[in-house]
Amino acid sequence: MARAFDIGVTSWGALGSGILTGKYKRDGSGDGRAALWGQIEEKKLAIADEVVKIAEEVGRKPSQVALNWVRQQPGVLLPMIGARTVGQLEDNLGCLEFTLTNDQMQRLDETSQIELGFPHDFLTSDQIRDVVYGGIYSQLDNHRG
């Protein structure tokens, strides 16, 4: 909606409460907060894994990749950073020094894609469309493609 109406968005929590910084590891290494893994959803871990892979590819920190992923979205989008130290601020600002490729952006977008579930899946099923549109849905001209 923001893109459609050219509204700027300031994203909150662009680093996913630290998950996208790479400091939490599945194997318990990292900063010693392995107990958190039981509380973090598998989907978030998959996104973090992809962020870390891309960070290794480009020789940057995962936090920088995550912030660039937000910055490079279409439209006017600005990530808010919550640095507590000068070092964190400097690390975060390092995202301004490089650009993710289209392939990297696509990988992150695909990994993070949200399953819409109910009612979307219900309403887009052929059976329901047949009922809602009186059996003529396939004959309609969908201007949205």
Image (cartoon, grey):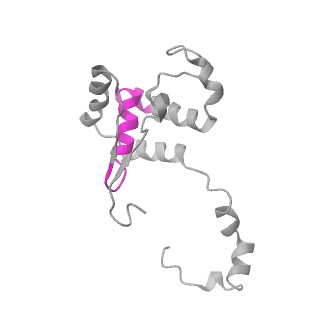
Check if residue 81 falls in the magenta segment: no
Instruction: Name the residue: 59% across, 18% down.
Output: 34
On the image, the x and y values in percent for residue 121 come to 67, 62
On the image, the x and y values in percent for residue 110 come to 52, 47
Check if residue 64 falls in the magenta segment: yes
Instruction: Name the residue: 50% across, 16% down.
Output: 30
Q: Is residue 129 left or right of residue 85?
A: right
Residue 114 or residue 78, whichever sits in front: 78
On the image, the x and y values in percent for residue 122 come to 70, 65
Instruction: Name the residue: 54% across, 83% down.
Output: 141
Instruction: Count numbered badges in the picture.
Output: 0
6 shown above or below 103: below
- Rendering quarter of residue 92: top left
Q: Is residue 96 left or right of residue 23?
A: left
Q: Is residue 109 left or right of residue 45?
A: left
Residue lying furthest left: 97
Residue 70 or residue 13, whichever sits in front: 13
5 shown above or below 101: below
Q: Which residues are magenta?
A: 54-77
97 shown above or below 127: above
Image quarter hosting the N terminus: bottom left
Q: Is residue 118 left or right of residue 95?
A: right
51 shown above or below 28: below
Instruction: Name the residue: 43% across, 34% down.
Output: 15
Residue 99 or residue 12, whichever sits in front: 12
| Secondary structure predominantly adopted by residues drawn in magenta | helix
